[in-house]
Image (tube, rainbow, N blue to C red):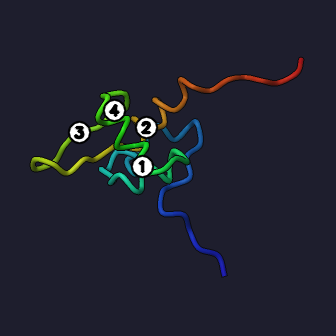
Amino acid sequence: MSTSPAYPVVSPGDQGSAELDGPVDVKTAARFLGVSASLVYAYVERKQIPHFRMMGRAIRFRLSELQAWRQQFHVNGGIE
């Protein structure tokens, strides 16, 4: 029995996909990034991660923006 992940699997060609533009909560964003929710809250507090607030305090993210943000930390460590 296989279960699907709580977030969509993202390939480089999927950046414009509609499923990546829906708002997700902190827990889903943390799973997508592979970090803890407390670290995501710290990034939000320091305004280091793209986010928006819905109805006051609810923090939401777009997976497409998180994917682009995550990509800036990619290091090519391959041997040539």
**Amino acid type of the residue tagged 3 in the rendering:** Phe
**Amino acid type of the residue tagged 2 in the rendering:** Leu
Residue placed under numbered mark 2 in the picture: 66
Find residue 21 and report its horizontal and vertical position in percent. Answer: 34, 45
Residue placed under numbered mark 4 in the picture: 50
Identify the mark nearer the N-term, 3 or 2.
Answer: 3
Task: Report the residue at 57% width, 25% height from top.
Answer: 73
Are the residues flagged by discs 1 and 3 in contact, CB closer than 8 Å?
no
Cα distance in 3D space between marks 1 and 4: 11 Å
Are the residues flagged by discs 2 and 4 in contact, CB closer than 8 Å?
yes
Are the residues flagged by discs 2 and 1 in contact, CB closer than 8 Å?
yes
Residue placed under numbered mark 1 in the picture: 29
Cα distance in 3D space between marks 2 and 4: 7 Å
Crowdedness near tag 2: few (<14), some (14–19) or many (≥20) residues, C-alpha within 10 Å: some
Residue placed under numbered mark 3 in the picture: 52
Q: Is residue 2 above or below residue 74?
A: below
Left or right for 58, reference 7: left
Find residue 11 and report its horizontal and vertical position in percent. Answer: 59, 42
Identify the mark nearer the N-term, 1 or 3.
Answer: 1
